[in-house]
Every structure is written in structure tokens, then in C-alpha cells.
Image (cartoon, rainbow, N blue to C red):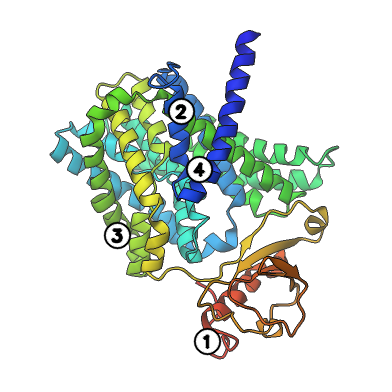
Amino acid sequence: MADLTLALGIGAAVILAAVLAVRVSVKVGLPSLLLYLGIGVLLGEAGFGIEFSNAELTQALGLAALVLILTEGGLTTRWDEVKPALWPGIALSTVAVVISVGVAGAMLHWILGLEWRMAMLWGAVLASTDAAAVFSVLRNLSVTRRLVGSLELESGMNDAPCYIAVVLLASTDPVTWTLPLTLVYELGLGAVIGVGLGWLGTHALRRAALPATGLYPLATVAVCILAFAGGQAAHASGLLATYIAGLVLGNSKLPHRADTVSFAEGLGWLAQIGLFVLLGLFASPSRLLDAIVPGLVAGAVVTFLARPLSVLISTTPFRVPWREQAFLSWAGLRGAVPIVLAMIPLSQGLPGATELVDAVFVLVIVLTLVQGSTLGMLARVLRLDPGAKPKEVEVDVATLDELDAELLQVTIPAGSKLHGVYLAELRLPPGATVSLVARDGKGFTPGPTTRLQEGDQILVVTTQAVRSATESRIRAVDRAGRYARWKGESGKD
């Protein structure tokens, strides 16, 4: 009983410290994921002396956390935002992965002298962008919808082919010509399972008369976890099934959707905190010193060669502009997923796996710090910042859910052509209205003659049916002013 009390006390203290770390990271501009790793290292052998070196348990818990993170990612991804980027996103999560694995593996074989299979294993581990890192960093940036959609789809779906490749390369089975067919089968069946369970779950939840509101979020998350279990049991991609099931559920008219999304986001944060603290606890700072050189070499190969080349080849057929390709290349954030994938060969006792894990730790720390803190600046330099970007705010009000309505928050930045526009000139579609304007720390109810100003924050109530049209209209006026339609500006990326 004393051990349980101590464990619960330490766990609660870690969660509170991690929650406070989010606030600190926002102020200093440091990705919060690194602070979670730091908390784990502080608790570990180099800090408070807690020894933890069970690679198999770390892999299992890491995979469980990844399932929750993908569930949250799927439930909170809006289909109307990712639909314009569907094919580039699929290409980034499949074709780009193959190219990245091949290029990184060949270069690491040549530079570090790794045996071919081990070099390709390094490439497969490093090809995965991290869903937690992307969802936590990217959604706080103001970039075009196509970029957000491409990166969200990639981060949600590319874990699956990378996981399959790592499992196959870490085994002792020979690599044969059937490998591509295996990948296609597992990904295809995983997608079918995800769509099927998402559709069944949606219809079951609509018809269920559960006795408590809080049961609906639990049931929704359970459907996504069931998709993972079903995919793995069918020898398909459980990770892809999880994300797609969440995507289907999150874009359906679920009862108490706002509560479900809020619950899923809380679980996602808890999974991120637990995962990164666990990985920090597993890390051995004394070994990481020897992994600095191979980690930096691998990071340079992936960041400046494998990633840009894979983005260029996979997105050029979709006529993605070079500015967006440059941003996509730099936004391939690495986080916990590569570390979890590296645990697979380590738990199997593969020779050289320890060096891989240590190098990935170094790489993740450096790349998360460098890339995560510079994405906003790069978006501005490449002129990819679309200006006033409506975003959905969390509102726990049942009447909005019953009316199929949503609340959007819009901040008018300096230089926006929304400045000086009368409210009536916004010409929002029927079903949308501006309900509140916050200016100089004070809020007021606007009228048709209210003129918007730089720095204003406005709240827009809109039905789900016209949300996309509302966002497009606001973007159009932001870019071209009150005569946006006459100038041919639609606000669609």
C-alpha cells in the first residue's frame, strides 16, 4: 500500500509539473515535449536515481500512448481542412517514407559504415514524423490550410508504414520481393478496418441512450482503441486503423461532440506527458555523450537530404509550390515515435540497437529544439502566414451541440485588410454571425456599423453546415478587403 501511495503521489506531481511546463514553454518558445523529456531525465539515474531500463515495457507503454495520441489526432482533425491536401498527405505518408528510408539508409551505410540492413533500419526509424510533435506545435502556427492538412495527414498516417518497416527489418526474416505487397496489404486492410469501425461506432453512438453524458467520450475513444486491436489481430496496421477511425468519428454528428473532443484532447496530453517522461526516464545521459556524433550525422542526413528529396518527389506531381515544399521539408518534426520505434530492435536484443536508441535520443532533442522553435519564423519568411485564421475554441455548452453550431475565434493581425471593414461588409453566409468583439481588453456586442480594427478579437457563431464558407469569407476579406469577391479572392487555399 505504501508503494502505491508513493507511486500515485509521484505520478500526480509529475503531471502537475508537466502541465506547468506547457505554460513555461509557451512563454519561452521552447517545445513542451523537450521539457517532458527533461522531467524524465531529472527523475532518472542522473537525477533522483530512479533506475528504469526495461526496453520491452517502454515499447509497449510507448505504443499504447501513441494509440491515444493518434486517437486524439483523428478526432480533432477536420475533414474540410485536410480534404484539399488529401493526395499530397497520402503521398507524404507513403511514397515519401519509402524515399526517405532508402536515401537515409544509403547515406548512413556510406558515412557511418553501418551494415545495409541496420542502415535501412535506421532510415525506417527516422522516417516517421511525430504526431504528438506536429499536433502540439503546428496547430499553434498560422499557416495555410493545405499545409496544415498535409502535415496532419502525414503525421497521422506515416507512423503505420514506418512501424511495419521497422518490425520487418528488425526481424531475422529475409527481405524478399513480397515486402511491398505486405505493406500494401497491411495498410489497405488497416484503412478498411478504421473506416468500418468508425462508421459502425458513429451509428451506434447516435442510437445509444447512455445514462450519463460522460459515457459518450469514453465509448468514442474505446471504438478507436478497438480499431487498433482489430487491425493488429488481422495482421493489418492497427495504427492506421486507429487514426482513420478517429477521423471518421470526429467528422460525424456525434452526440456531445464538444465533450468528446475535450476528453480526447485531455487523454492526448496525458499520453504525451507520460510518453516523454517515460522516455526521459529510460535515457542514460552517460551513454548519450557517445551518441552525439552519430546522432547529429543522422539528423543532418534526414533533415537536409532525405526529407527534402522525399518531399520534392512526392509532392511535385500535385503542383505544390516550392515555398510550401520548403516548409514541408523543414516541418518533418521528430519526437517520441522514432524513439518508440527504436525500442523494437532493442527489446529483441538486436546487435547495435542500443547505439540506435541513443542516437535517436540525441537527434530528437536537437531537431525538436531547432525545428519546433523556427517553424513560425520560416512561415513568415516564406510568406505562408495567411493572416487572420479562424480557429475553433472549446465551448462546453450543450445548446451549441444541439444546434449543430460552433464558435470561431478570429484575431485581426497588423496589416490585415479586415481593418476598417464594417461588420455588414463581411457578408457572412446565412447561419453565421459575429456575436462579440473584444477590443483593448473590453468586449461589446457589435452592430452592422461596427468597424473592425487591428488587434480586435471577434467571436463568430456558425452552424456546422456553413463553417467552411464562413472561414473562407473571412480569409478572403483579410487578403483582399471588402471587395474580395470582385477581385476574384475566394479565401480557399
- List the residue tagged with mark 2: 40
Residue 340 appears in the picture as rendered: yes
CA gap, disc 1 to disc 4?
39 Å
Residue visible at 18% across and 43% down? 107
- List the residue tagged with mark 1: 488
Q: Amino acid at mark 3?
A: Ile
Q: Amino acid at mark 1?
A: Gly
- List the residue tagged with mark 4: 240
Label 4 CA crowd tier, 10 Å (few <14, some 14–19, many 20+): many
Q: Amino acid at mark 2?
A: Gly
In front: mark 2 or mark 1? 2
First-in-chain label (3 vs 1): 3
First-in-chain label (4 vs 2): 2
Residue visible at 77% across and 49% down? 255
CA gap, disc 2 to disc 3?
38 Å
Where disc 2 sits, the SS reads: helix
Q: Amino acid at mark 4?
A: Leu
Q: Quick check: marks 3 and 1 in contact, CB under 8 Å?
A: no
* Left or right: residue 329 compared with residue 108: right
Q: Is residue 286 above or below residue 181?
A: above
CA gap, disc 3 to disc 4?
23 Å
Q: Is residue 345 above or below residue 142?
A: above
- List the residue tagged with mark 3: 313
Percent position of residue 305, x then y: 23, 52
